[in-house]
Amino acid sequence: MCKPILKWVGGKRQVITEIKKLMPRSYNRYFEPFVGGGALFFDLKPKNALINDSNKELLNLYTAVKETPNELITSLSKHKNEAKYYYKTRILDRDSKSYDKLSNLERASRFIYLNKTGFNGLYRVNLKGQCNVPFGSYKNPRYCESENMLRCSELLKDTEITSGDFENIKNKIKKGDFIYLDPPYVPINTTSSFTSYTKDGFDADTQRRLRYFCDYIDKKGAYFMLSNSYTDFILELYKIDRYTINTIHANRSINSKGSGRGKVREVLITNY
Ligand SMILES: C[S@@+](CC[C@H](N)C(=O)[O-])C[C@H]1O[C@@H](n2cnc3c(N)ncnc32)[C@H](O)[C@@H]1O
């Protein structure tokens, strides 16, 4: 078994069973262009895959897990679960000179440590790209799970890892491949005329660009499955005879503070 190395906003762990039920029975290469924490990827353990994300720190992290897992484990074991140490580690990105001095391995190690010991087990950055999550005060945060790290490393050895916009992988897609797309969601409570700015920059035009990307995959004779929110905007955008809009229910935060949780409708759109 491989467990995701990070906890990621919008992670798909709790809806994996439903996703797997709706996947094609067989396919050639597996692609995940918005991989984030990679809940589905680590669960499926595909033999020959490509993972991508626009977040460069993720590319650096997965590359370190792939190429230098033992050094990463050693580095992780040196961190301390103490508030003073946490803030000293967190503040490194406030000054680009000290951040640039970190090796790729040190950056990956810091990323995992902050993700696992920070409040809510999340990694969040402000507009300047600086981590702003307070210390979590957890008794035993598991930031150094060596056996899991080695298993993930084995899996990543067969995986191509890239970083950039989702369209960059276009030329690699071939007939019979399967592409799982889990982009930043259209905000719920928006109307079909949603155009507004979203905090991750994934606005209405980018959602439309993603729809054309799905059409490209379809024309290539490959399979796609797309997750998004159940909103008028998405239902309109994918209202095409060839595509199937499946509805699933996910347990998600239902208010901006994240304190209320409830069942939220989501869509899984497929072209098969
Ligand atoms: C909903 S999350 C994916 C969660 C993932 N499925 C998991 O289980 O953790 C969306 C991801 O898309 C990435 N992203 C945002 N804009 C992108 C773009 N234009 N191209 C590629 N990735 C992008 C974000 O960095 C984020 O990791």
Image (cartoon, rainbow, N blue to C red):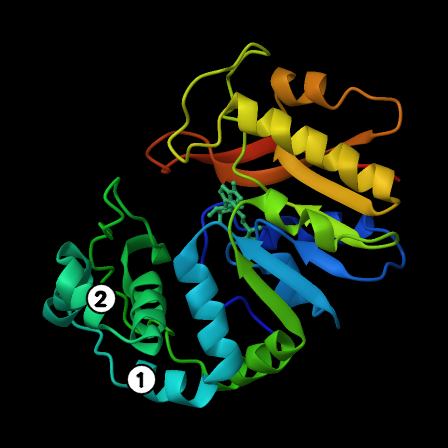
Task: Give the image location of residue 46, x and y in percent.
Answer: 73, 68
The quarter of the rendered structure image containing the N terminus is bottom right
| Side of 53 relative to 135 (left or right) | right
Q: Position of residue 37 (x, y in %)?
A: 51, 58
Q: Amino acid at mark 2?
A: Asp
Which residue corresponds to the image point at 85% horizontal and 37% vertical from the top-left? 219
**Would you say the beta carbon of the disc 1 residue lies within 8 angstroms of ligand 1?**
no
Please give the residue where the numbered disc 2 appears in the rendered image.
Answer: 100
Circle 1 or circle 2, nearest the eye: 2
Give the image location of residue 111, x and y in percent: 33, 65
Q: Which residue was labeled with disc 1?
A: 75
Which residue appears at 89% of the width and 56% of the height? Answer: 25
* Of 177 and 268, the residue lying toward us: 177
Which x, y percent locates residue 30?
A: 74, 60
Residue 130 visible to the viewer: yes
**Is residue 195 depicted above or below 251 in this figure?**
above
Label 2 packing within 10 angstroms: few (<14), some (14-19), many (20+)? few
In this picture, residue 85 sits left or right of residue 177: left
Tell me which numbered mark, 1 or 2, is placed earlier along the sequence: 1
Towards the viewer: 10 or 14: 10
Q: Residue at 39% of width from left, 80% of height from top?
A: 144
Q: CA distance from mark 1 to mark 2?
A: 18 Å
Disc marking residue 246: none
Left or right, residue 200 beside residue 76 = right
Residue 266 appears in the picture as rendered: no
Q: Is residue 215 left or right of residue 5?
A: right
